[in-house]
Image: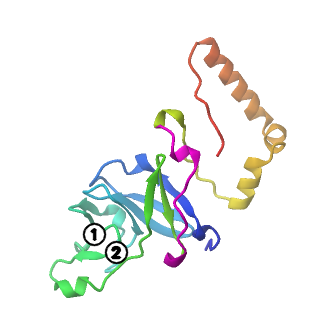
């Protein structure tokens, strides 16, 4: 699914969703794939298949410990590259043969980006202005839209769509800004990207 989108770095999740090394993993669904993201002991980010290769238990319930995500069912442990690095009661040469799907990640501008396409066609890392400015100069939010991505993009960049169809939203937005100005609260600058 999404062969075109797989050729680019795409936003997978916000940095605040996995803030701490060895913290709990976060579920991520991208392009029809169910994944988990986690920050290992060293702070490296893993984005791997959600389900353990052994009994398909969800790694979202896993323990993030000692540079890997350990399945709570039988203890198989995976690193950020999807390699099985530990299996209780099995010889090491067996775990060396087990690997989950894993995608490269890069953290820039408060966003964890991933590339899900062919390894030999990996593009340069994202280079948007929002990735280069300090946190105090950007505002981000995450919205899950169950829709066709192209139609959502077209609606977002169509200059006549919002003021016509969503005019009550823009009026409410103006009223909210006026209240903030009257209460002498400094407004953040919001930009569409």
- Report helix, strand or loop for mark 1: loop
What type of secondary structure mainly makes up the magenta span?
Answer: loop
Q: CA distance from mark 2 to mark 1?
A: 7 Å
Give the mark nearest the N terminus, 2 or 1. Answer: 2
Task: Tell me where residue 38 sits by quadrant.
Answer: bottom left
Which residue is located at x 55 percent, y 44 percent?
130
Say if mark 2 contacts mark 1, CB within 8 Å.
yes
Bounds of the magenta segment: 118-134
Residue 32: x and y in percent read 56, 70
Q: Nearer the viewer, residue 37 or 89?
A: 37
Q: Which residue is mark 2?
A: 52
How busy is the neighbourhood of tag 2: few (under 14 within 10 Å), some, or many (20 plus)? many
User: Relative to 41, is 102 on the left or the right?
Assistant: right
- Looking at the picture, how far across and down is residue 177, in whole percent? 66, 22
Front-lying residue, 104 or 64? 104
Residue drawn where x is 55% and y is 60% of the image: 10
Q: How many marks?
A: 2
Q: Quadrant of the N terminus?
A: bottom right
Could you say whether the residue bearing mark 2 is in a helix, strand or loop? loop
**Label 1 environment density (alpha carbons within 10 Å; few <14, some 14–19, many ≥20):** many
* Residue drawn at 48 percent across, 46 percent down: 109
Residue 84 at x, y = what percent? 28, 76
Read off the residue under disc 1: 71
Q: Is residue 119 above or below residue 140?
A: below
**Which image quadrant is residue 9 in?**
bottom right
Above or below for 180 versus 145: above
Q: Is residue 26 magenta?
A: no
């Amino acid at each position: 699914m999404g062969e075109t989108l797989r050729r680019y770095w795409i936003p997978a999740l916000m940095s605040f969703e996995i803030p701490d090394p060895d913290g709990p993993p976060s579920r991520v669904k991208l392009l029809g794939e169910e994944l988990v993201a986690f920050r290992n002991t060293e702070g490296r980010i893993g984005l791997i298949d959600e389900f353990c290769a052994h009994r398909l238990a969800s790694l979202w319930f896993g323990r993030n410990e000692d540079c890997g995500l350990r399945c709570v069912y039988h203890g198989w442990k995976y690193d950020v590259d999807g390699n099985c690095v530990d299996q209780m009661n099995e010889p090491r040469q067996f775990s060396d043969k087990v690997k989950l799907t894993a995608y490269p990640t890069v953290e820039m501008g408060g966003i964890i980006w991933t590339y899900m396409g062919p390894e030999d066609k990996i593009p340069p890392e994202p280079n948007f202005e929002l990735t280069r400015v300090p946190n105090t100069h950007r505002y981000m939010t995450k919205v899950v839209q169950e829709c066709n991505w192209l139609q959502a993009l077209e609606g977002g960049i169509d200059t006549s769509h919002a003021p016509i169809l969503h005019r009550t939203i823009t009026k409410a937005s103006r009223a909210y800004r006026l209240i903030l100005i009257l209460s002498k609260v400094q407004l953040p600058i919001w930009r569409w990207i």
